Amino acid sequence: MTGPLTGSVAEATAIDDPRVTIIQIPPSGGPSRPRNVGIKRARAPFLSLLDSDDLLKPNKLASSVAALDNCPSAGFAFGDFEKIDTDGNVYETSVMYAYPKFRALELTAIGEKWRLVPQSLLSYALLYEDFIGTSGVVIRTSLAKEIGGFDETLGNSKRQRSVVPTGSHLRCPVLP
């Protein structure tokens, strides 16, 4: 990368933690290539993708990992998300509940806030509606590598569900 650091790169560079690695690659025209590079380089048992225009709530990652630890058969966890304006004011408190197929899912409680959805029901619902935000997913690294990442031939405007497993043998915690 040449020129001044972008805001997110400068912030990441300032983090004094050996687990944080900055990987610089040439612009690719979409999110798939950078995500796949990150998946291939991941060493931790879990990974989370964060788009440059998204923010995570303080306990989001720890809560997701705890849900996955409590449900070893689950391959990934995802949560609802809010929309905020440029001043940080929430203007939409739940994005997933706007989707009828998500609201119709049979969710089983697995803790105070997390719910479990069978993968077969989730896969069916996703055929009709794309209610999982990429930045809302925490996935087991081994599963992300097994799936093979994102389709790099799709442009930025195409939704890419390839990181969401489709096998009916997996269950998935969700934080509605």
Image: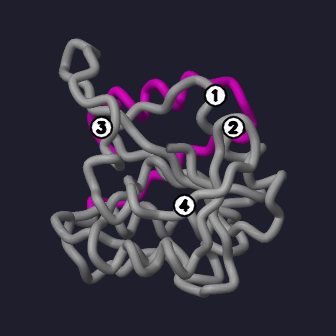
**Is 14 left or right of 80, judged from the image as shown?**
right
- In the rendered image, which residue does mark 2 sit on? 63
Q: Is residue 165 above or below residue 176?
A: below
Q: Which mark is residue 53?
A: 3
Start and end of the magenta stretch?
1-27
- Which of the 4 image quadrants contains residue 127? bottom left
Q: CA distance from mark 4 to mark 3?
A: 17 Å
Q: Are marks 4 and 2 in contact (CB under 8 Å)?
A: no
- In the rendered image, which residue does mark 4 sit on? 38
**How dense is the environment of label 4, judged by Cα within 10 Å: few (below 14), some, or many (20 and up)?**
some
Q: Residue at x 36, y 68 (%)?
A: 32
**Is 125 left or right of 129, judged from the image as shown?**
right
Q: CA distance from mark 2 to mark 3?
A: 21 Å
* Mark closer to the chain start, 4 or 2: 4
* Residue type, label 3: Asp
Q: Is residue 128 above or below residue 117?
A: below
* x and y percentages locating residue 160 in the rendered image: 33, 72
Q: Residue at x 69, y 49 (%)?
A: 109
Q: CA distance from mark 1 to mark 2?
A: 6 Å
**How dense is the environment of label 2, judged by Cα within 10 Å: few (below 14), some, or many (20 and up)?**
some
* x and y percentages locating residue 16 in the rendered image: 68, 24
Closer to the observer: label 1 or label 3?
A: 1
Closer to the observer: label 4 or label 2?
A: 2
Main SS, magenta region, reads loop
Q: Are marks 1 and 2 in contact (CB under 8 Å)?
A: yes
Q: Are marks 4 and 3 in contact (CB under 8 Å)?
A: no
* x and y percentages locating residue 48 in the rendered image: 57, 51
